[in-house]
Amino acid sequence: MIVMKFGGSSVANRGQIEKVLSIVDSARERAPVVVSSAHKGITDALVNAAKAAAAGELVTTPIDLQRQLLAQLECPVDLLDDCFGELSDLLRGISLVKELSPRSLDYVSSFGERMSVRAIADFFTRNGLAARAHDVWDLGFITDDAFGRARPLAGWEANCQAAFARLPANEVAVVTGFVGKNREGEITTVGRNGSDLTASLLGGALAAEEVQIWTDTDGVMTADPSVVDGARNIPQMRFDEAAELAYFGSRVLHPSTLLPAMSSDIPVRVLNTNRPAHPGTVIQKVAAPSPNAATSIAYKERQSVLVLRTTRMFGQAGFLARVFEILGRREVDVDMISTSEVSISLTSADRPALEAAADQLATIGKVELRHGKTILAVVGQHLPARPGIGAQVLGAVAGAGVNVEMISYGMDSINFTMLIDDADIGRAVKVLHEMLFAAV
Ligand code: ASP
Ligand code: MG
């Protein structure tokens, strides 16, 4: 059995969905389970409609967009009337109370996947591939109550296996990504771009042979192809390398996707819906050594940095613990950190949380906040074995006139991380790509 996940751009319109049909059809003998995202743009339209409703305004954009898809796919016109009715009622309710809780936002957002799987399964069936749409919560995906970042409850796998065992073997299951339900039956979501995560969780629970993530690039690339012309495909990488890349902003995989696959040791293959013959990238426990000094470059922009300076830190046990206790209480998610005897610099993407913590940290030292920063990471399993790589990286970046404000590189680390200005991303990535991946 394999899990095949298709992202929003892969199911954006009829042309794309026809490609998906032929990809799934040619995998028939591997017993595919399809996990789909909402059609491209629908989730954003739903979120905007929910926000508009909370401001007292009713918009029909998501329903209009979905109706266009139904027309393109020649689905029965009333196929999604139940969804449309429920969504309209829900938006009306929100517009009356003028309040949008995380719970209602998840409920509204869930319609994208619920509608897309129904349209896709109907289209497949009418075009020669018997398929059935499923809401993933009917297949055992019962989550905690963390709206917007829900995770399945411990032990859910047994229910999931039992539910799949009951499905007819002659129909391809087309399953909603992204959504779930809690024990009370309220709809939750695992977080934006979370269909990858649903796919790898299902893959883990069902002990799939492989989890395939179908997207719109030739697998994972050495750098963002929209920034670097010469960006190339990476044929193989290790789980930990891919996890670092996903975390540092490579747009191909959701950062949490690899955890379930890693713990069940199931290979994750990233493939291109527009070029199905391309082998893409396979991510697994061991990967053949790459000929380059690094595996890939990724970056995360719009970060904030906080610098705390105090002479009280000098020679004081427990000082860092106090700082992190304050950050923890304000729920600051810290990414990079670097310390000296008298100062700590740390970064976070969550500006409001960092600002809240800054007020409190000001009671123990002098605090400075700066915004508009990018974390730039060079990732590769061979970094620890390449003496001088740090100097080369910094030299190349400096040569491009880019100022590096912080660096972080741990013992045996597979990533070398720098903090630069958002405005310098293009220059820095290009020069690093040139140096690390110059044509072999
Ligand atoms: N449709 C959801 C989103 O746009 C989930 C996904 O695409 O993976 O965030
Ligand atoms: Mg997506």
Image (cartoon, rainbow, N blue to C red):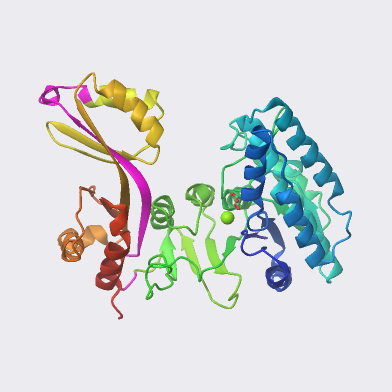
Q: Residue at x 56, y 46 (%)?
A: 192
Count of numbered marks: 0
Height in image: 440 above or below 415?
A: below
In percent of width and height, residue 280 lies at 51, 71
Whether residue 236 appears in this view of the structure is yes
Which residue is painted at 40% across and 37% down in the image? 350
Q: Where is residue 107 in the image (x, y as percent from the top left)?
A: 69, 37
State the image quarter where residue 440 is shown. Answer: bottom left
Name the image quarter holding the N terminus.
bottom right
- Residue in the image at 76% along x and 34% along y: 92
Extreme residue in the top direction = 363
Taking the image as shown, residue 325 lies to the left or right of residue 339, namely right
Q: Is residue 379 visible?
A: no
Look at the picture and state if 315 lies above or below 38: above
Relative image position of residue 238 (x, y in whole percent): 41, 59
Image quadrant in which you'd find residue 387: bottom left
In the image, which residues are magenta? 290-319
Looking at the image, in which quadrant does ligand 2 appear?
Answer: bottom right
**Is residue 284 shown left or right of residue 102?**
left
Left or right placement of residue 20 versus residue 165 in this view: left
Q: Where is residue 209 in the image (x, y as percent from the top left)?
A: 61, 60
Q: In this view, does 402 lie above or below 310?
A: below
Is-magenta flag for residue 159?
A: no
In the image, is residue 291 part of the stretch drawn in magenta?
yes
